Amino acid sequence: MPPPITGPEILKIRHLDLRLAEKQGGAEAGIAACPGTQPCGKQCGTSVAPTERPQMLLSRYFLPVLKETPADAEIVSHRLMLRAGMIKQASAGIYSWLPLGYRVLRRIEQIVHEEQQRAGHIPMLMPTLQSAELWKESGRYDAYGPEMLRVRDRHDRDMLYGPTNEELITDIFRSNVASYRALPLTLYHIQWKFRDEVRPRFGVMRGREFLMKDGYNFDLTKDAALHAYNRHLVTYLRTYERMGLQAIPMRADSGPIGGDNTHEFLVLADTGESEVFYDSAVTDIRLGERDIDYDDMNQCRSVMEEFTSLYARTDETHDEAVFAQVPEERRRSARGIEVGQIFYFGTKYSDAMGATVQGPDGKPTPVHMGSHGIGVSRLLGAIIEASHDDKGIIWPEGVTPFHVGIVNLKQGDASTDSACEGIYRQLGAEGLTALYDDRNERAGAKFATMDLIGLPWRITVGPRGLANGRVELTSRRGGESEELAPEEAIARLRDIYAVHR
């Protein structure tokens, strides 16, 4: 049996923290003197930071969890987001994002930004309110229908709350780009959108206000624009896999955006709004850690063909005759949640709005365009639908709001409190964020909260374990627990999350 953690062992954790603070701040940061030789074996005689309490204490965090499921929540993700204190309905289909939900939302947004910029796409930001004149110019103002929220300002000018941004980005392009030498160009932003759904339901899955990434490519030729299409498909596959999702690209209908080439990305789930038909072999394909050169047209086309050559279609484009050619044992029909869509629509908007560049021959040439969307806020619901159990949410490591939860089984006990705080700080030194449950609650209530909010890992610290030099590391997904020395638990988490940075 390993020796128990003693007072000097606890001081060792704390002293290592102080030495880290010394490196980060020094005497100029208001740092006290180190007393000299410590249980860590280091002769310091230098400056160290005074001990500070952890910042993410559950006793001080705003986490309004609910014990009962709201009656109007019809699907799992809506119920769990409300119960876990992630969102609160402001009006029909419109939600306030509370701190826990906001952390996940920002993490998803960060992944989207990283993968778009990895492919060379340039971020920007366009306004939520747009002039109706641009939409009248493209012909979509009257065609879009009642889903568009239309308003008038005090000068009686027609405005709209943007459901999408093809017109606005085309106007930006035509005002600033004159030569083919500026191409190819892909701009994107992440912005709130509004579509006035007749019957908003299912929480963030089918709300009226939603956060969306929409990107727009401008190319001189159709071949170049189709490369942008394929490039976006690859970036989306990588984005979803980083979030712990398998999103299948399926041939779909273009709807009011238009164009002949379009794929939706769907996550299979019983609560999905779309009926889908697919060859089960498509679920065996993964992008994984492939090294992708986004400028390589052949490589991007090859990935696109690999993921789209097998039958996978939404109900709008389903063809029974073609589906019948799939081996019977691999034919599947299911429900799917749409989490993104890509479009190539040629010169539809550039022709209508005069977005041309001077071509190599000196003549005006309309640019070929595409648009590419990811439902950022909708992804939270999709992830929960795909990853939960009867106890609550199970966040994939890539999107979790906190990397680990720390549960103190005997709050107020000096040794247990000190060990928890030391573990918290050491996790921080490894770049890992912890939510420390320091409440004076019974253990069962603490475990129930952690299970509900779904952090992938939990470290449980109690007097009995500390007497043996051990804490308990528990996996939320599998439920397995392992007793480890505190430094071993921290090292294990560091290694687990290394692939998600």
Image (cartoon, rainbow, N blue to C red):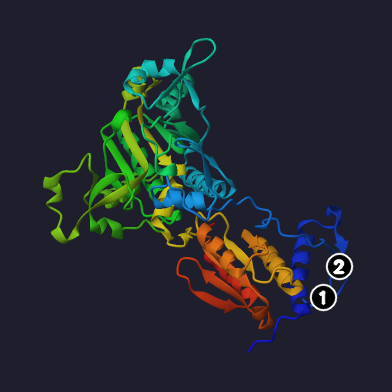
Q: Is residue 373 above or below residue 359?
A: below
Q: CA distance from mark 2 to mark 1?
A: 9 Å
Residue 464 position, x and y percent, is 65, 80
Which residue is denoted by mark 2 in the rendering? 34
151 with respect to 102 (left or right): left
* Residue 366 at least partly seen: no
For the N terminus, the image quarter is: bottom right
Q: Secondary structure at mark 1?
A: loop
Q: How many marks?
A: 2
390 with respect to 322 (left or right): right
Residue placed at 47% from the left, 43% from the top?
A: 377
The disc label shown at residue 38, or none: 1
Return the residue nearer the eye: 63 or 356.
63
Amino acid type indicated by mark 2: Cys
Q: Tag 2: Cα neighbours inside 10 Å, few (<14), some, or many (≥20)?
A: some
286 with respect to 310 (left or right): right
Amino acid type indicated by mark 1: Gln
Residue 364 position, x and y percent, is 36, 18
The answer to whether mark 2 and mark 1 are in CB contact below 8 A is yes
* Residue 333 at least partly seen: yes
Q: Secondary structure at mark 2?
A: loop
For the C terminus, the image quarter is: bottom right
